[in-house]
């Protein structure tokens, strides 16, 4: 199917971060874009401002009559009227987002970034390095990159940077030239059933890499011993990685570092530490690792370390990835998308390293009943790294409630930390009462709707003092 000749596209679930990137791609290429989503959000409002049409009623009459292609999210509920009508009518192609990405990346030099966590940051950093350096790419991101105010970056059409999503095994449709693996952890057990199945699927994804391609993996990724017949390069902080972080230093709220890498000199492969120091405004050593992954990709493409360091230093971050909302002497407020125990651990640890003498208050909204049920001991262990924890009710997303599964499972498992379970409507007042020094709002549900309310409350409080 020639997607370049499609003039009208209908999206079911257009407000999803991956779906909206595709919607922006088609709009950028001149197509009419109409979409459905369950609720209006800041992102859907932005899509409308960019010339797209969005409705919020699951009504067959609202399906555009001139649609030549229908794209849907795999998270759409089974009883969705518009989706079932279009699928059964079979008058136009009805494709998953992953199927469209497969078509768009076919015959393109594709850099696919996958992993249980970190993939959005690495994808965004990689796309920014390629764009900032002049190498160029077209990028589909899993978050809103601050430099571009978008999750879609138009550019060189022959090089595609794409976030490889393991949910619903979507990334198995990609056939990358370069695959990056950031981590392989236990998640999406509602899809996979076991950690072994997750690892098997990541191995299968690596098997999709082109015969002359390569795999760039974080050095501790568990599946590395199982990868065969592929060129493998590793990155990490510890000795033994091909691309190793050196000289990490925290200064003025930024992480500064160098990268040691293999270099061919006088016919011999030697280790060399870059003279160029990169400065990263995103907090956390995990983001230094993410920047090193992007560096490894760029070096393999022949981009100079000087240009790479300059690009990383100019990277402004991603919305909801350790995003500073308030940064004053009296209050530091950071919002983060973390929704897995390891992501939460990294987020709180980053805040602790940057602000070692301040009290850290973490607000967490669990995402999915199934994930909470599977991982609540890990959530508790990570959250208790904070000085005080406020839990919100579980955000169900695509799921129905599970008997006995509530945020109380996490609350009861947290030890040695001031903790509370607070209703959504009471959250802002509770935070104002507690007078936090470093505040983290964490989660992948609709906790982001609280951000402006919290910001307004503390801004107003400061004005009144």
Image: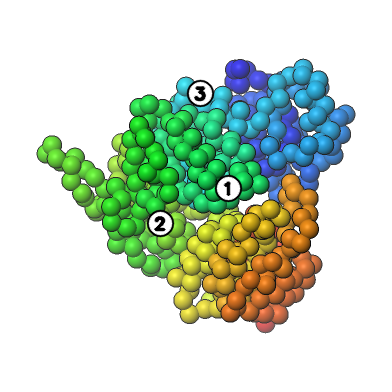
Q: Residue furthest bottom?
A: 465
Decide: is 408 above or below 91. Answer: below
Q: CA distance from mark 2 to mark 3?
A: 31 Å
Q: Secondary structure at mark 1?
A: loop
Decide: is 10 above or below 2. Answer: below
- Residue at horizontal 38%, vertical 26%? 211
Query: What residue is shown with label 3?
Result: 106
3 or 1: tag closer to the N-terminus: 3
In which quadrant will I find the C terminus? bottom right
* x and y percentages locating residue 47 in the rendered image: 69, 40
- The quarter holding residue 34 reads top right
The 10 Å Cα crowd at callout 2, few under 14, some 14 to 19, many 20 or more, is many
- The quarter holding residue 167 reads top right
Tell which of 224 and 120 is nearer to you: 224
The 10 Å Cα crowd at callout 3, few under 14, some 14 to 19, many 20 or more, is some
- Residue at horizontal 72%, vertical 75%? 430
Query: What residue is shown with label 1?
Result: 194
* x and y percentages locating residue 238 in the rendered image: 32, 58
- The quarter holding residue 217 reads top left
Query: What residue is shown with label 2?
Result: 288
Instruction: Give left or right: position of 362 versus 294.
Output: right
């Amino acid at each position: 199917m020639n997607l370049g000749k499609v003039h009208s596209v209908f999206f079911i679930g257009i407000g999803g971060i991956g779906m909206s990137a595709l919607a922006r791609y088609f709009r950028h290429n001149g197509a009419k874009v109409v979409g459905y989503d369950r609720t209006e959000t800041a992102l859907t409002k932005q899509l409308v401002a960019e010339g797209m049409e969005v409705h919020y009623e699951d009504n067959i009459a609202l399906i555009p009559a001139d649609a030549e292609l229908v794209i849907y999210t795999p998270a759409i509920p089974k009883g969705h009227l518009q989706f079932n009508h279009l699928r059964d009518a079979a008058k136009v192609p009805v494709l998953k987002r992953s199927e469209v990405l497969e078509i768009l990346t076919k015959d393109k030099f594709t850099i696919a970034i996958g992993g249980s966590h970190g993939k959005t940051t690495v994808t965004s950093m990689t796309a920014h390095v390629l764009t900032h350096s002049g190498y160029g790419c077209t990028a589909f991101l899993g978050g809103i990159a601050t430099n571009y105010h978008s999750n879609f970056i138009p550019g060189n059409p022959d090089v595609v940077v794409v976030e490889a999503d393991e949910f619903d095994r979507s990334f198995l449709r990609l056939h990358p030239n370069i695959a990056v693996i950031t981590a392989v952890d236990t998640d999406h057990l509602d899809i996979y059933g076991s950690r072994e199945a997750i690892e098997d699927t990541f191995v299968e994804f690596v098997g999709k890499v082109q015969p002359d391609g390569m795999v760039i993996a974080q050095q501790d990724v568990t599946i590395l011993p199982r990868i065969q017949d592929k060129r493998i390069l590793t990155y990490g902080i510890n000795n033994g990685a091909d691309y190793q972080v050196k000289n990490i230093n925290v200064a003025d709220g930024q992480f500064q570092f160098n990268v040691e890498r293999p270099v061919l000199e006088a016919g011999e492969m030697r280790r060399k530490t870059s003279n160029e120091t990169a400065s990263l405004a995103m907090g956390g050593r995990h983001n230094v690792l993410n920047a090193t992954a992007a560096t490894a990709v760029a070096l393999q493409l022949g981009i100079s370390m000087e240009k790479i360091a300059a690009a990383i230093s100019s990277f402004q971050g991603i919305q909801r990835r350790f995003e500073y909302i308030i940064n004053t002497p009296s209050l530091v407020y950071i919002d983060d998308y973390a929704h897995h125990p390891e992501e939460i651990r990294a987020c709180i640890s980053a805040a602790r390293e940057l602000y070692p003498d301040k009290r850290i208050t973490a607000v967490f909204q669990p995402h999915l009943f199934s994930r909470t049920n599977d991982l609540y001991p890990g959530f508790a262990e990570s959250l208790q790294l904070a000085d005080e924890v406020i839990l919100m009710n579980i955000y169900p997303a695509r799921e129905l409630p599970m008997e006995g599964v509530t945020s109380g499972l996490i609350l009861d498992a947290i030890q040695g930390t001031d903790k509370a379970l607070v209703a959504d409507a009471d959250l802002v007042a509770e935070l104002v009462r507690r007078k936090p020094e470093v505040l983290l709002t964490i989660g992948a549900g609709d906790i982001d709707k609280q951000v402006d309310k919290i910001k307004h409350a503390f801004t107003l409080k400061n004005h009144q003092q």
